[in-house]
Amino acid sequence: MNIIDNHQPTAKLQALDAAHHLHPFTDTAQINARGTRVITQANGVYLTDSDGHKLLDGMAGLWCVNIGYGRTELANTAARQMSQLPYYNTFFQTSHPPVIELASLLARLAPGDLNRVFLAGSGSEANDTNIRFVRHYWASLGKPDKSVIIARKNGYHGSTIGAASLGGMSAMHAQGGMPIPGIEHISQPYWYREGGDSSPEEFGLACARELEETIERLGEENVAAFIAEPVQGAGGVIIPPETYWPGIQRICDAHEILLIVDEVICGFGRTGNWFGCQTFDIRPDIITIAKGMSSGYQPIGGSIIREEIAEVFADRGGEFNHGYTYSGHPVACAVACENLRILEEEDIVGNVANVTAPYLREKWLSLGDHPLVGEARIIGMMGALELTPEKSSRKPFAGEEGAAGLICREHSFSNGLVMRHVGDKMIISPPLVISRSEIDELVEMAHKSLDQAYADLKQQGLMQVSR
Ligand code: PXG
């Protein structure tokens, strides 16, 4: 019998998983004690586990299955490409049709003159490429000291040492000697938790100004780039105040530094436009892409670079001593092309912008009336709920951070909805193809989970405000 056909009983699969498989971002002892949930198939917005339970996937996998599960066109494309040319590299003066087609398609879809593509196997690898690229770019212009990259606290850019150093996740930095030298972290525009008495607009401007102050403190001659997500995803769907991105753009325009916009989550429709930088009117020099580029059907990532910068790099940089075995993998590229074709032909992004995101928005924001919710926020197809012990203030719970979020998440899974928690924030990021009736179902299950979590928290005496 073949395990991947799931002919084994759940308990057997769980025992083998516990014995041999180390999970990412997981407390191994804890997960092995509890047993994993084994997902065996998926279709549309629904997952099925090995016991036959159906779950609405409110997270699109890990923010990536933008076109939903079960698109046989992608499976057929992969099979065809595997038969024709399963692998070849793009290193030694060689190329192949899928990578050529994907690069030109991305250049057409990406805004402005973001026209040159460097491919990788994931978002983390792409951000490592970005570190190497921007540093070598300035060095080749005779400015090797321009090497510091400014990033943000609680930003997420991946899990390789380079990408995790760009990220501002303190729990990640605490393991394995990060960040690497030459990365500076500034405040995140997280008004709900960190805005104090200032208005969101004032706070957004103050956070942007911190970029300018940091450039001045370090000396512009030492700064290579600033990197940020349009909306922080893994940090908890942190939608910046309206003043933030115009402030950042002005500062980047006024200084000779490169702007890297990490579109790994926001790209390919998530915010209601093809790219988050269009939603916020940002003009990046480089964007990082992954996830929705293939809707997660194949692992692939990359960087799209402005024409002018890529030209200088080509003229002055000589050989770029960097690349991955799977840069431009033919099967991943072919599947990404097919995914992008479907996104375009079915106008999935337009449907999000005009139909389903406004519908979800109205319903999601209504959860803000729940006694356990301090703020409901949403943009496009990514939303968050701030759980609160006291609706009138923005103060956190007195108990351990994340305890309330975990209780709510457990109820949500039991109710048949994959809704994540990041600390005491509940977050969703469903497939872009979610329908109105599926949105009704999602919001109903979220509401029920909030009711159940609220009852538990009251009963356990956890509705206490941190003073
Ligand atoms: N940039 C951003 C903005 C991301 O969200 C990466 C880069 C790295 O991509 P790869 O493909 O290397 O994983 C990401 C990934 C979570 C979670 O718990 C989020 C991500 C990955 C894993 C977990 O929200 N984002």
Image: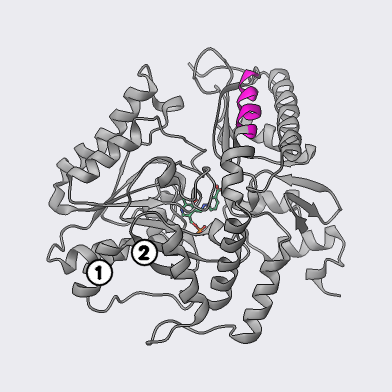
- Report x, y in % for residue 428: 62, 40
Q: Is residue 229 in view from this perspective? A: no
Q: Which residue is mark 2?
A: 115
Q: What label sits on residue 415 in the rendered view?
A: none
Q: CA distance from mark 2 to mark 1?
A: 11 Å
Q: Is residue 76 in view from this perspective? A: yes
Q: Which residue is mark 1?
A: 311
* Secondary element at image label 1: helix
The kind of secondary structure the magenta stretch mainly shows is helix
Quadrant assignment, res 376: top right
The correct choice, above or below, for 256 with respect to 381 in the image is: below
Which one is in front, 222 or 89? 89
Dot 1: within a 10 Å radius of its alpha carbon, few (fewer than 14), some, or many (20 or more) residues?
Answer: few
- Asked if labels 1 and 2 touch by Cβ distance under 8 angstroms, the answer is no
Q: Quadrant of the N terminus?
A: bottom right
User: Which residue appears at 28% of the width and 67% of the height?
Assistant: 310
Span highlighted in magenta in the image: 359-369
Q: Is residue 334 magenta?
A: no
The correct choice, above or below, for 402 with respect to 142 in the image is: above
Q: Is residue 367 magenta?
A: yes
* Secondary element at image label 2: strand
Q: Amino acid at mark 1?
A: Glu
Comes first in the chain, label 2 or label 1: 2
Q: Amino acid at mark 2?
A: Asn
